[in-house]
Image: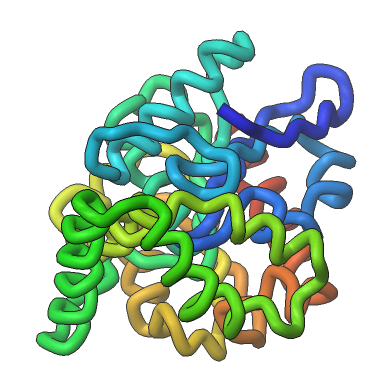
Amino acid sequence: MFFREVPGPPNAPTLVLLHGWTATADLNFFTCYQALGEHFRVIAPDQRGHGRGIRSNKPFTLAACADDAAALADHLGIATFIPVGYSMGGSIAQLVWKRHESRVRALVLAATSGYFASTRQERLSFLGLHGLGVLARVTPSSTRERITERVYLQRKVSNWEPWAAAQLQQHDWRTILEAGGALGSFNSRDWIRTVDVPSSVVITMRDRVVPVKRQMRLFEALPRAEAFRVDADHDAVYAAADQFVPTLVRACKSAVERAKV
C-alpha cells in the first residue's frame, strides 16, 4: 500500500488524508503537505485502484477503503488519528468513524457530502459507471488501456505537468469505474447524526461538483461540527490553494483542540 508521510512535530496528532475520486494522494494534497506537516504527522495513502493504491480482484467498496486506513494505522503503530476526507475521501472518512469508531479522535471533511446522488439523472449517471465497471471486468486489459489513453488521458492531461499526468496513468481504470458506482450508492444520512467526535467541515462555496446545499446539510447534521468556508470551486485544494490550505490547517487544528475538551 503506497502512502506519503510527513513526520510532523514530536508527539503531534496524526492526520490520515483521504483523497477524492480519480485523484491520488499527491494530486489531491500536494499543496497541503508542508503546511499540515508543521502541526501534524501526516499520512496520505493512495486509495484502492488509484495511483499506486492496492490492487484487488474484489469489487471496489468505500468500506474497504475505510478498513484500509485503519489497517495502515495499525501497521504504523498509530492508535488514534483524524481522518481528513476530500470529496470521495469524505465519504470514506465518515465510514472510518462508523466502522472504527474507537480509532477516530475527530473528523475533517472537505468539499463532500453525506450522499452524492438524489436526482434521477444523478442516479442514472452513477449507475452507468457501475455498469462500465462490470463490463471492464470482462474486457482485456490491453483494450482498457487503449481506451483510457485515447478517450480520457489525452483530454484530461493536455495542460497538466508531466508528474501529474504520470499519476493518472498509474490508475486501474476498472477499479476507478467501480469507485464511481460505489460513490453513487453512498448515503450516511441515516447515521451521520450519531457521530460523537468533533468535526470540521470545509465548504467550497462555488462548488459545481458537490452542491453547496449538500455540503451544508452534512455540516448541519453533524452534532459537534464547525464550518469553514472557502470561496472557490471543487478544485479549491490546488486552484485556490492560497485560500484552501490555511483554511484546512485551521479546520484540523480546531477539530483537534475540541477533541481535547
Q: Residue at x 81, y 33 (%)?
A: 6
Locate residue 212, reporting x and y percent: 43, 83
- Quarter holding the N terminus is top right
Examine the rendered structure and indicate whether residue 68 appears above or below residue 112. above
Examine the rendered structure and indicate whether residue 256 appears above or below residue 115. above
Q: Residue at x 20, y 51 (%)?
A: 138
Q: Residue at x 29, y 44 (%)?
A: 60
Q: Quadrant of residue 187?
A: bottom left
Locate residue 186, reporting x and y percent: 23, 57
Examine the rendered structure and indicate whether residue 211 appears above or below residue 8. below
Query: On the rendered structure, is 147 left or right of 98?
Result: right
Q: Nearer the viewer, residue 197 or 174?
A: 174
Examine the rendered structure and indicate whether residue 231 appears above or below residue 83. below
Locate residue 75, reporting x and y percent: 56, 11
Q: Nearer the viewer, residue 129 or 73?
A: 129
- Quarter holding the C terminus is top right
Locate residue 206, reporting x and y percent: 55, 90
Residue 161 visible in the snapshot = yes
Q: Describe the colour scheme in one phrase.
A: rainbow
Q: Residue at x 57, y 42 (%)?
A: 46
